[in-house]
Image (cartoon, rainbow, N blue to C red):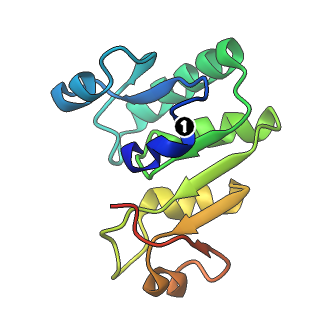
Amino acid sequence: MLALRPWWHERERTWVTFGTEDARSQLDGERAVWAFHPTTRNVRNLVRNFALAVRVMRRERPHVVVSTGAAVAFPFFLVAKAMRVPTVYIEVYDRLDSPTLTGRLCRPITDLFCVQWEEQTRFYPRAQVIGSLL
């Protein structure tokens, strides 16, 4: 998401990510909500992040939800869909051999699904190729 700074830096925003040391450092001074992790096949944290998504989405009322592929995206995309908030999913840049679980879950419910490599369209034929963000 930092690579997209020219797009978001003048817009009001709320970040939802994991409260890791590097995330806290990079988001110092930004409005941030810390999601529950680990998320990889962790049903308890999926439920907790879904409840978090409902609270955050009701409070913030965003115009769009954008994700670069963390598993926490799925509950936020579900809530966004229910609230008729547009979603943009950007598949991770380092997965060329298979689709990510989050990508497979979010693709059917996202409004704009983007990939960074032409090779990724094998898994997501209708994806928009945007090129590498790094």
Decide if residue 63 is on the left or right side of residue 77.
right
Decide if residue 134 is on the left or right side of residue 22.
right
Report the residue at 66% width, 17% height from top: 60
Image coordinates for residue 66, horizontal then vertical, percent: 57, 44
Name the one closer to the observer, 74 or 95.
95
Residue type at numbered disc 1? Trp
The answer to whether residue 74 shows anywhere in this view is: no
Residue 107, above or below 44 = below
> How would you rate the neighbour count of disc 1 (Cα within 10 Å): few for under 14, some for 14-19, many for 20 or more?
few
Report the residue at 39% width, 50% height from top: 3
The quarter of the rendered structure image containing the N terminus is top left
Q: Mark 1 points at which residue?
A: 8
Residue 131, above or below 5 = below
Image coordinates for residue 20, horizontal then vertical, percent: 21, 28
The answer to whether residue 4 shows anywhere in this view is: yes
Residue 19, above or below 122 = above
Q: Name which quarter of the figure residue 116 lies in.
A: bottom left
Decide if residue 97 is on the left or right side of residue 49.
left
